[in-house]
Amino acid sequence: MARDGQFQGRWWPILLSLPQLLLIFLFFYWPVVIGLKWSFFLERPFGGSAEFVGLANFQRLFQDTEFYAAAGRSLVFMLTASAATVLFSFVLAVAADRKLRLSGFARNVLFWPQALAGASAGVVLSYLFNPATGVFSWLNTLSPGLWNPVLDGFDANILLNIAYMWGRIPIDFAILLAGLQAIPESYHQAAAVDGAGPWRRLLDLQLPLLTPQIFLCIVIEFNESFNQAFKLIESMTHGGPGNSTNQLVYKIFVDGFRGYDLSGSSTQSLILMLLFIFIVVAQFALLERRVNYAR
Amino acid sequence: MRTMFAAAAAFAGTLALGAPAQAATNFDFWYAAGQRAVEAQCNDFNASQSQYHVNCVYQDSYESLFQKAIAAYRANRQPALVQFFDGGTLDLLLSNAVIPVTKIAADAGQKVDWNDYISGAKSYYATRSGELYGQPYNSSTLVFYTNDDMLKKAGITKAPETWEEVGEAAKKLKASGVACALTSDLHPWRVMEEFSAAEGIPIASEHNGYDGLDAKYVFNKGLEVQLITDLADWHKQGMFTLSRETKAGDYRNAFNSQECAMILNSTGGYTDTALALKGKAAFSVHLLPIFAGTKRYNTFVGGAALYAMKGFDAKTYKAVAAFLAFLRSPEQQMQMVINTGYLPVTKSGVKLMENGGLANYPERKKAAELGVESLNFPGNADTRGIRLGFFVQFREVFRAEITKVFSGESTPQQALDAAAARGDEMLKRFAATYAGAKMP
């Protein structure tokens, strides 16, 4: 052995990573290839002769107003849910970072929702926010119909955002808190000696030093909210009321698995993938330049 | 997304391995409705003879069964027999993946009088020439449930028969302090398909698609607009509640917990309601309301039929044929009625019901008789069934568009026009997908 912790030869590393590679190929690349093929054919649900139609599937999609609406809903949800989640997590992390009584306990409690599966959270929350019996039902005694997520698309989207935040705050909170605790105490002391109050220190010291963690949070939240809202939509709103929460990820599922429109569904997932690649690239191009990794 | 198909197929494959090893001819049967009742039938069949063994696998819901069956068929791991629901009929007829049950029976040397099936149940699953493709199995139809105690308290002595009377009853119920007079989930099966059948009006041209793949939706003209307009008005006046607005969150639970006084529900739900309201309140079931001054036609059969899938040898199909024959028997149909509230679907089954087959279940009999009566009203070319492509997807579209009426986003006409326009797009795409396919 030349060095500890290093495998010899060309085949060992490949052999050891083979199971993982195989899984990725089977469950990611192969489906992508099939989906790509189906996007250019009219595929029958039970198979059989599929007709090559060129770009007709894309043409049809680009004329479908519901497709644009669904993509728009996905983007809006991505922005609102990510922004709200990161902001709340930041506030909580800053609060928990201060040496207050019970902050150790609070750190633990705040992490609990992470342990709950998204679908279960959706079921619980849709009962919790039921217009007739839920926690917001008092709003309806003030003015009837003020809170009705089963009929009002705006309320349904608020509900979806709340549910998303509730499930996602723990992980962001943990990342940001770790970042805050990594800032040496001496920086705070030095700043305090220079006369900086808590607010000043937050803005000029903690925030700039926390940019790598904030960037990481934004990247994972963009990914998560854009692609993973599915379980919440399926368990809470089913895309309704009146399509108001029918995001692209959900529409793809409904078209393909409920409607058996395999080609339409594949075409949309291909576009979703391209759209998401674009978003990630844009994030790194625009945001990462402002991240300060040096400490 | 595609991975789900692969995973479903793999999972289905492991389930299939659960069959006990026997000398008998084994085959798999996937089903999704009436779990206890179907299980009982499977056990009875296996116990009744030793030549064949059916391995019954419960699949949670029609939708997921259909998904798994598609995945399994593509992976060549399909079961020999499946239960498929009404909405997917045309998808199956054109799938080239199933063998008509009439052929299965004939190949096995069985002589079956297929005309024994009551016409309302037969036409839905039959080809244009009247040959049954799937064997009608758990069959139901839509009826109108009333909580008679709540109606009486509101001063209503006779259950409403027309939509006009439903409106008056709802008004009186509301005045008597009932917060939820009428509720529905706006599923098109309840507020459009069965309604159109009972009124004898077409849902789509080409007689609901029976005469060709170039059908177009026409439900957005005529009585359907009136029905949705009425429901929307009643909703504004607090006389109609959407299923999800109820405390129970579901129209059936809302009725069974006496929160709501009137619902449209399948005859298949009768047993649940009877159990829930036993000793608490009197309820009854009635024919679907129609508009005053219109003629009543037969309603569609709802539920599911059994289809034999391609890809097996003659020996297996012989076993499938034996199982299908077992299920066709009036006695087994009666078992199904007793255990679920579904309807007998053959004339001999109905006869057995009338001649003491349900002697110990007088209430069940009342509901089943009503369902059969509803299916047996005279029909026309538009009440045979629905032969429209991507219809399962269309149901989602319909519901989404109609919900917009109740949030004030669309007028009934706008919503129905939008649903029809999007539906037409889907029909066009379906026709293109199956270009060259011959409609059986």
Image: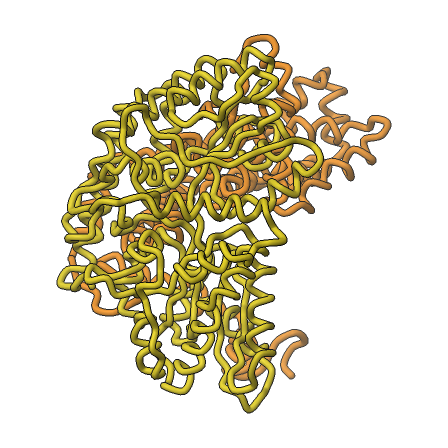
Using the image, determine if residue A273 lies above or below residue A192. below
Q: Residue furthest front?
A: B355
Residue in front for this viewpoint, B358 or A70: B358
Left or right: B37 as drawn, with respect to A222: right
The residue at the point 42 percent across, 33 percent down is B186
- Colour theme: by chain
Q: Which chain is yellow?
A: B
Note whether residue B232 is visible.
yes
Using the image, determine if residue B235 lies above or below residue B361. above
The residue at the point 42 percent across, 19 percent down is B167
Give residue B161's position: percent from left, percent from top: 41, 27
Using the image, determine if residue B151 lies above or below residue A23. above
Q: Residue furthest top?
A: A142
Residue in front for this viewpoint, B358 or B177: B358
Note whether residue A74 is visible.
no
Quarter of the view holding residue A35: bottom left
The residue at the point 19 percent across, 46 percent down is B207
Residue in front for this viewpoint, B351 or B135: B351
Using the image, determine if residue A98 lies above or below residue B197. above
Left or right: B28 as drawn, with respect to B101: right
Q: Name the image quarter holding the C terminus of chain B.
A: bottom left
Quarter of the view holding residue B153: top right
Q: Residue furthest bottom?
A: B23
The residue at the point 36 percent across, 86 percent down is B314
Give residue A119's position: percent from left, percent from top: 58, 45
Q: How many marks?
A: 0
Q: Which chain is orange?
A: A
Give residue B386's position: percent from left, percent from top: 28, 49
Quarter of the view holding residue A175: top right
Left or right: A229 as drawn, with respect to B292: right
Q: Name the image quarter holding the N terminus of chain B.
A: bottom left
